[in-house]
Amino acid sequence: MKRIKFIFEKILPIVLALVLAVRMLCYDTNIVLGNYVGEFNLAYDETTFSPFPKLLTTILLFVIWIQYLAVVITIMNNYFKLPTVKIICRYIVSWNFILNLVFLVPILILFQGSSQFSILSVMLVLESLLGITLINYDIYTNKVELTFKKLLKAIGIFLLIMIPFMPIYFLQYVVGPFPMKAAIYNLRFPHRVLLYLAVIIPMVIYFILRNKPREVIRFTLIIMSIGVMIGFSVGFCYDIFYNPWDLPLHLCNTALYIIPICLIFKTKRLFYFTYFINVLGAFIAMAAPNYSDGSNLFEAEIIRFWYNHWMAFFMPLLIVALKEFERPKIKQFIYSMVWFFGYYVMVLILNVVFLAFKGIDKDYFFINSEFIADKLGKWAENLFRITVSFNVSGHELVFHPPYQIVYFVVYILLGLAVWFIYNEFFRIADRHYALSMKLKTIKMNQYVSDIEITKEVRSDMMNNDIVAHLELEHFSKKYASSKVYAVKDASFEVKAGEIFGFLGPNGAGKSTIIKSMVGIQPISEGHIRVCGYDVTKNPVMAKVNIGYVPDHYALYEKLTGREYINYIADIFDVSLEDRNERINKYIKLFELESSIDSKIKTYSHGMKQKITIMSALVHNPKVWILDEPLTGLDPNSIYQVKECMKQHAAEGNIVFFSSHLIDIVEKLCSKIAIIKKGHVECVKMVSEIEENTSLEQFYLQAISGNLEDSNESN
Amino acid sequence: MNQIKTLVLLQLKDKIDFSSLIDKKTRIRTVIFAILKFLIITAVSFLIMFFSCIEIINIFTPFESPRALILVMSFLLILSIISCTYDLMKNLYFAEDNRVLITLPVNSNLIFISKIIVFEIYELKKSFSFLIPITFGCLLFLALRGVASFAILIWCWLPMLFIITIPVVVGAVLSIPLMYIYRFVKKYTVLQLILFAALLGGGIAGIVYLINLIPENINLMSQWAPISDFIGEFLLSVETKMVPFRFLIEALIGEKSGVSYHFTWWILLKTLVIIAFDVVVLLIGYFTSRPLFFKMMAKNFELNKNEKKSLKNRRLSKHWTFINKEFKINIRTIEISVNYLIVYIVVPLMILLLNALYKAMDTRELGNWLIYTFNMLIICLPMLASNALVATYYSREGRAAYLKKVKPIYALYPLFVKILFNMLFSIPSVFASCYIFGNSAEINPFATLLIAIAVLLLHFGHMIWSAMLDIMNPQNEQYATTGITVDNPNENFSTILAFIISILFAVISYKIFSEVNLYHWGMFAVGIRLMIVSGIFFGGILMLFIKRIKAYYYEIQG
């Protein structure tokens, strides 16, 4: 059993890969350069292009196209345990293997011009048989549940992943010339569209894949890179081994082979060569393409050009963006420069040798011609003209040392420069990703909070009657860049009708707790609930029930007092009758008759404090939170505020306030909490404290750490 | 002396955030960027001088180039004096930290001196971004062309230091009478309106006068010789008439002898004269302000107490109340409103002047595309640059800004309403500018409308971006304590973005305009394309704004 498993899962896929590789190289003509290519700008004509009717030719080309995908995905199915891939293999590509056998003879005719028995025919048959065998093995050993939705999804994914596998001649043969004259050079509009696609395609792929599991990302990247490599390589056959000058050794061509190798075998050092060198080269090539001006958009060579350069441009960046390989550091840059040096020297020598010995001007990487120098100006042309030649066996090898050295150095510097640009884009991408994750979390919390609204609140909501309640549950707060907790594990509860005093020395954490309650600061840990609503998950509902008086008044000084209070009342949806009654009451109480319609800018400190208090009460909040509210008030106003607090609590609401004035707290509050260095030292009823001692003595004991009983009590 | 030192350090520590410079990487990055900025501006200045002297253009010869330097220096210094006077008025008499400083046990004169010193430090810092590199670029050109000695490149730093001080000390002196004029005018609203109308009318009349001066037929190529002669004569008159500024330049580059300038002992004497001037003016300012500074400063904390008639309470919907509040605050904050009004009126007038000039020129197709591109640039640049103020909108609320988080309404709406009026006020300006451009260039009105929408979307996009900068990196505390910010990073970044976006949009516009003949629908297609470009920018920024507010607003520590 183990042996069978080993054969089917390890040996046969490799054999199938080898069969495909041999098959791709073994036809001596190919469709691009073969019998069926006439002048491209002739109308599609069955007699000159294909011996078969147009529909059949299209079907055959389609089968050939899908066959590449079928083989690759069948091989990869053994290495990736993805249900969708299995569905594609079983229900879609398996049919293509069968069609490949059914249409074997016409396919042979298209490839090699006759139906003669050949290695090609053997490979095609073997391919299909191996494919079918592997798929059947997979069906036998792995159960996959099929639903209509899954099948649709598989078909959708299939249609997407087949795109990279499109042979470069497909459009040329099936569709014919592109109908409109499109200027795909000199940054004209069609050229720009293709450049935009070089950016849009990877962005779309990135957004689709970024949240997917690692296996899916890896699978997609590998199949894309193999697909384009195959689609590009259909133009080659075995004679490249006899004519090495036909090898795809241009910089961007190498990317098509390096990328799949690096992805499959995880070779990092080689990968970063494509990252630093190929991407830049591809971008420059796309910006200034070297095909002829009269090229047509569907021509095989144009498709080859753009597929090649899109892939060389965005794949390395996409691979790093999707974290398949890590962001490079200086070490990787150095390795890539070493590879680049090796490549540079190799093509330099090959160019010179091919030209000298065979008269073939291949000019890999354009370092042996004036193609680049022409674009740079006279100085570059002059530099190019400085040559050094060697005579080898009667053949002259001509080099252009200054030009070629400058070319090399400038390219390295550009590679270094674009590294910073990539990093900037990755930084932006990371920020956007963090942003979208954050929004997702917020949405989840909102959803959860809608379910979590406490039972009491739900029944009270049904009774249209919210009960005042304030609860801190293991609340902790750490400021952004600090390791120290400003408040640690604070828990207490305040019920309706209570006036709760919050005491503590300066910097103890009183304002921190209050600001977290009212929503000015986010909570690090724990929960705060106001009338049953969590201030983090349901902030709006929580804040509806809060009236807040800050320690330092914060007002719009260009508004009048009345305008400001009406503005606050509008936000809290207070009816006109209610606000008239309350505003007039408080104006009288705080003696602001003469000032209420003057700009707040003209008010004294005490008057501004009064306006702040009024604005916090205009909507009659269930929970009235005050942070040291009596500072700066005259004695009469202090008395009035205290009376307001008593009345507010007597109406079944909560008054929660912090203060340093122990006398006032003692007389006013029913319950107090003492906080010291971020810890709530105790929570007690005032009456309980006063059985044994004064509040002042109790506070001093608590602050000095001499409390016998420091447990929280409600 | 110790007291002055303490006061200066106190104010500097409050206004400048040094925490980011603790980190070594940030320090290195800051230094590198500063050097790069300096080098780029120096290079641009050098190249402008260089190209002005080349044979084809020949505005002046290398040996006449010091005259251009005199003109540049005059322009920059006069501008600097105006800006310093205005800023000093704000700093000396209106800053919120005066309330704190005046309570300290120091003489009010020492507060005056300390504020001047702090301001001088900021001016020096600002000069490294602008005045110094421009001047250095010109000096480099003079040295390389043999007009002056290479020694000036080392020497110039000393006199430059004191030349930069001139606008500060002059501004300090001028701020005193100007404060009186300001207080006088402030008392009478009618007077303010008359003054504003006079300035506006004067500006418009000036533009119209300039337009009428433009000859009917301008052919730069054939008329270049007389134009060049005119420029030469103008520069000569600048050299002979602008004696004080010539004196300053001579303190930098030396005494004129023949056609070149020689580095002699007179340079040192002239520098001493400049130093003496600075000291004398500073002393004048000091002694003049001595009896006046405290009173003038303290008066700004006094507010009129008038009996007001009791008004009624009014109820508005939750959404209208924000609009109502912002409207009232905008109207009552005259400085901001006037600032926008000026930009929104000046831009159409500038376009009118420019297009009158262009219309008089005989241009080829390439010239037409360049004209269209410059129009786009001239419309976008000031409109976007004015958005730098938007990058301070939320911080200006001081501590009141935090209270938005306390209210039971999602902050996105009130945050957006804050910039709504800006958006509304800018619409007529953009449409007017584009109408003038379209009319002058004889572009189809519908295409003009599309171009105007494109510019508007760009303007709104940058405005929202500036707002986002302020929300994400609030400077509330500085506004809360001092009432102003100095060296607001959000404002600076917004201004840089304005330049970059305007130039990029101009480049894209050029490309799109130049292709108008290649495709169907001509200018209509141009309008659509520009709208698509701006629309993508605006849509992207708006989405980012909404998402960032939702994700981070409530986490920004208050």
Image (tube, rainbow, N blue to C red):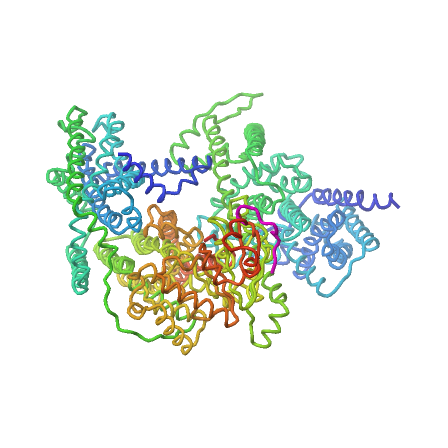
Residue A118 horizontal side relative to residue A421, left or right: right
| Image spot of residue B8 (x, y percent) | 30, 39
Residue B458 vs residue A413, the one in the foreground: B458
Is residue A354 visible to the viewer in this orientation of the structure? no
Note whether B106 is above or below B360 in the view shown. above
Residue A604 horizontal side relative to residue A161, left or right: left
Note whether B62 is above or below B454 in the view shown. above
Q: How many labels does the image show?
A: 0
Q: Which residue is outermost to the front?
A: A692
Q: Which residue is outermost to the bottom?
A: A577
| Image spot of residue A307 (x, y percent) | 58, 48
| Image spot of residue A20 (x, y percent) | 73, 45
Residue A707 is one of the magenta-drawn residues: yes
Is residue A106 visible to the viewer in this orientation of the structure? yes
Residue A4 vs residue A213, the one in the foreground: A213
Residue interval drawn in magenta:
A702-714
Residue B57 vs residue B222, the one in the foreground: B57
Residue B179 horizontal side relative to residue B512, left or right: left
Magenta: main secondary structure:
loop
Q: Residue at image x 47%, y 44%? A: A288
Note whether B238 is above or below B440 in the view shown. above
Placement of the C terminus of chain A among the 4 image quadrants: bottom right
Residue B233 is one of the magenta-drawn residues: no
Q: Which residue is outermost to the right?
A: A1
| Image spot of residue B554 (x, y percent) | 49, 57
